[in-house]
Image (spheres, rainbow, N blue to C red):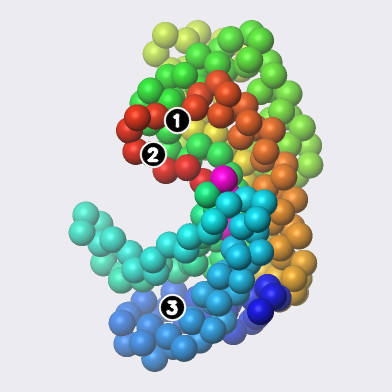
Amino acid sequence: MAFKGWSSDAVEFFEGLEMDNSRDYWHAHKAIYDEKVRRPMEELLDELAKEFGEGKIFRPNRDVRFSLDKSPYKTNIAGTLAKGGYVSFSADGLGVGSGMYMPMPDQLERLRRAIADDKTGVALEKLVAKVRSSGIDVSAHDELKTAPKGYPKDHPRIELLRMKGLITWKQWPVAAWLRTAKAKGRIVEVLHAAKPINAWLDKHVGPTTMSMERR
């Protein structure tokens, strides 16, 4: 079946899960999750696969081994695309992004060197400005409060140097268009906007011999 968005039932499922994050709630509403939450994500990832690579949906169970919060289930559904892309749906709405979420130490070192370089850094700065001008955020999951060691605090690209990664990201609240195929179009727009920054990352940072999480 073709992707037609997420219905109000999907939003209500996550609203209920936020109020009652228990195995009893999950099993009582699993049919709704399978049909109204997971199936649309599967359909979406299948349609995106030709351009953005094979999709993979994250497990709904939380890893609570090292967390004080023992809630057993995630309050969103999320998937990744092999060629770069992350999609998340929850009661808060839809989020989509791409980039280097948590680069390994060797990657972070190369990222900072490339940002600091007057040629490659200026090129990235222009790409970031263009993406932001279209209403899409470029940020990181975390950032330093000051300049990283070895870099001046007054560096012209200090904002980028302080970032512990580089992510292109767009978040939308729940709206009527989420219940239609238009949601796919908006996701594709963000993934297209992210491509030049991802190409810059591939060229100047590249992969690591260590495992990493790329979104």
Where 141 sits versus 12, above or below? above
Residue 33 placement (x, y as % from top left): 48, 81
Q: Left of 193 or right of it: where is 12? A: left
Q: Residue at x 39, y 13 (%)?
A: 149
Residue 166 placement (x, y as % from top left): 54, 34
Where 33 sits versus 151, above or below? below
Q: Which residue is drawn at 33% across and 64% down?
A: 62
Identify the magenta region.
83-87
Which amino acid, mark 3? Leu
Name, please, the residue furthest toward the front: 50
Q: How far apart are marks 1 and 3 (CA)?
A: 37 Å
Residue at the disc numbered 2:
212
Residue 87 placement (x, y as % from top left): 57, 58
Residue at the disc numbered 3:
17
Residue at the disc numbered 1:
207
Q: Do the residues labelled 1 and 2 touch (CB within 8 Å)?
A: yes
